[in-house]
Image (cartoon, grey):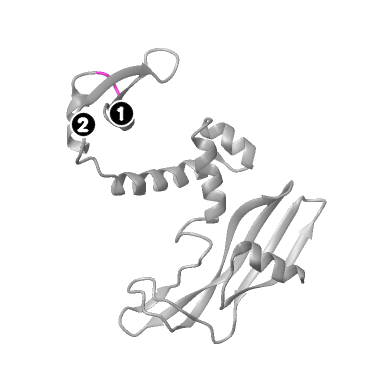
Amino acid sequence: MAERELFERALGLQWPWRVERTEFDAAERRLDLHLDFEPGGTFDCPSCGRGGCKAHDASPKRWRHLDFFQHRAYLHARVPRVRCPACGVKQAKVPWSEPGSGFTLWFEALVVALAREMPVRAVARLVGEHDTRLWRLLKRRVGRARAEADFSAVRAVALDETACRRGHDYITLFADLDRSRLLYATPGRDASVVGLFREDL
């Protein structure tokens, strides 16, 4: 199996996407995978989902991917804008990343899994990224998860406060007693936090 085909299978690429070339730098401990779409390839409209949209133009983008053994890996691709008869010209979605993210879906999944077990600063050191980039990733993921969460069956709630740093910085946590899950967390411990929770719920 050719090297490019191996990477195409590993990334789950489907037509019209392909691996155009690879660059491996042992001294820099870095692997760069350059992807492109086949000439004449068509895409789905990112707004309405209509298929068969042709590329209007394309702009280069880069995403951090999972490490390849001990080497940082990056994907590079020209991301097309497509012309949809109904929606006009829109930037196509790529299958390996969400719009506006500088990370691949696999890298994001790793960061989310690690952030469940350790502080974000430790995750940043481990994966070699700045923690502010990871916080943006996590905020987007948590926001989406909370928007999709269904709290309509919540009947019994417990609240507790805990110190979040040395000194007197407190957060208040609200939990669903029946399902043992966190519903809401907010800085502070006075009566106003109950109102914030009520509004959020």
* Left or right: 26 in relation to 175: right
Q: Amino acid at mark 2?
A: Leu
**Where 74 sits versus 189, above or below?**
below
Residue 196 got which mark?
2
User: Which residue is pictured at 46% across the width and 59% down the height?
Assistant: 98
Disc 1 and disc 2: Cα gap in Å?
A: 8 Å
Please name whichever residue, 93 or 187, is drawn nearer the observer in this view of the structure: 93
**33 or 13, which is in the foreground?**
13
Whole-percent x, y for residue 121 in the image: 55, 33
Q: Mark 1–mark 2 contact, CB under 8 Å?
A: yes
Of residue 192 and residue 94, the one placed in the foreground of this image is 94
Residue behind mark 1:
186
Image position of 93 (left or right of 184): right
- The residue drawn where x is 49% and y is 35% is 116
Residue shown at 59% from the left, 65% from the top: 12
Residue 104 forms part of the magenta stretch:
no
Q: How many other residues sit within 10 Å of disc 1, few (<14), some (14-19) or many (≥20)?
A: some
Quarter location, residue 161: top left
User: Disc 1 or 2, which lies upstream in sequence?
Assistant: 1
The residue stretch that appears in magenta: 184-189
The local secondary structure at tag 1 comes to strand
Measured from the top left, where is residue 44 in percent x and y? Answer: 42, 76
Q: 38 left or right of 5?
A: left
Q: Residues within 10 Å of mark 2 (few under 14, many from 20)?
A: few
Secondary structure under tag 2 reads helix
